[in-house]
Every structure is written in structure tokens, then in C-alpha cells.
Amino acid sequence: MEREDWNQRYAAEGLIWTARANRFLVAETEGLSPGRALDLAAGEARNAVWLAERGWSVRAVDFSDVAITKARQLAARRNVADRVEFQIADLREYEPEVEAYDLVALVYLQIPWADLAPILVRAARAVAPGGTFLLVGHDSTNLAGGYGGPRSADVLYTAEQVVGALAGALAIVKAGTVERPVETEEGTRVAIDCIVRARRA
């Protein structure tokens, strides 16, 4: 989906995703000392706002201007507008500062691998010494074995692919799949996500 497709989707009244931060981002970052964070594909900024509430200074980047408008509103409602800098940019072209961020997060950026791989390389370069890289995505195995998520294999990937794209630039702390319970009308279903946490020495 391109910018206008996402703009149309984000044009719905209210948030199209929950205002709660991603559970895996919360679990993996709660123990980190707040610093400077980069939230790539930030959408409506639920994760950026949560980080800002915990003392992080956050740059939130997304290519949907409609999403960024809603993100600014969420940050204002939660009284952290002064801690989040918003930027409209296409990640396929965006070049973050090198070794500038204590946390670089990508949560559910589901695009074709040929586009994603160079974004991961640039994201890894943006991690400061001692900083953390965190990716959470819909795993390839979710298509056949899990609930929800994209129905196209072209935009799904695995932790192993992400680790390969990082090519040793960062020290891998965690890489694999995680199960995410999803409440539905039919009961609790399970989605399969991939997670990669890495660190620059």
C-alpha cells in the first residue's frame, strides 16, 4: 500500500489501532534508561507516545500525513507533545542520523522484503553505542498457523531474515517468534509474531 492508500485508511474517525503501546515493545524497553528514540513507521504514534510518557525524547516517522496528524493529537491528549518530534517521510528514502538513537523501533512494518531490507540496514546504523534495535513484525508462519495479520506472504518475514539483513552490524540479544493472544468473538486466538532485539556495543 502506498501513501494515499494509508491516508484513506487512517482517515477513519478515531484511531484505527489501539492507543495502547505494543506489548512486546513495552516488555523489551521497560528496563532501558530513557534517552533518544526513533520510532519508524510510527502510524498513530501509540508506541512513541508511551515512550515519551516514560521520559524518552522520540522522533516518530511515518509517510502518512493523515496518521501523523492523528499522532500529534494523541501526543497532545497525553501531554507529551513536547517530547515527540513528528516527521513525514517515506522510509524507503529516509536516512536517519548515524549512531544517534538509544532506541530504534520498527513495529509491524509489513512491506516487501526488497524494500524492507535496506530500511533495516539504515535503522541499524542509527543505533547509538550502547543502544537498542527492536523489531516486531507479523511472522511468515502466521499466514498458515496464526490469526490475523497480512494475508500476503510477500510482506511477511522471519526473525532469521532480519538478523541476516543486519549482517553482524549489531549484537543479537533475542531473535525468534512470539505468540500474541487476540480476543475475538469466537474466543481467544493466537497470532505469531517475530521479534528481534539487538544492541550496539
Image (cartoon, rainbow, N blue to C red):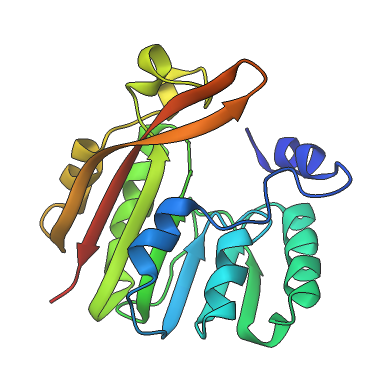
x 30%, y 63%: residue: 133
Res 70 → quadrant: bottom right
Decide: is 151 above or below 62: above
Q: Which residue is found at the position 14% from the left and 57% from the top? A: 172
- Vertical side of 161 occupied by 198: above or below: below
Q: Position of residue 34 (x, y in %)?
A: 41, 84
Of residue 81 and residue 182, the one placed in the foreground of this image is: 182
Please tell me which residue is depicted at 52% across the width and 86% down the height of the picture: 55
Quadrant showing the N terminus? top right
Q: Position of residue 132 (x, y in %)?
A: 28, 70
Q: Residue at x 50, y 64 (%)?
A: 39
Asked if residue 118 is positioned above or below residue 46 in the image, the reply reads above
Picture coordinates of residue 11, whole percent (x, y): 85, 44
User: Is 83 positioned to the left or the right of 103 in the image?
Assistant: right
Where in the figure is residue 201, as x and y percent of width and height?
Answer: 12, 77
The part of the image, by quadrant, that contains residue 78 is bottom right
Please, which residue is most extreme toward the top here?
144
| 128 left or right of 89 in image | left
Decide which of 184, 97 is in the foreground and name it: 184
Picture quadrant of residue 178 = top left
Extreme residue toward the right, this view? 13
- Count numbered badges in the picture: 0
Q: Nearer the viewer, residue 192 or 125?
A: 192
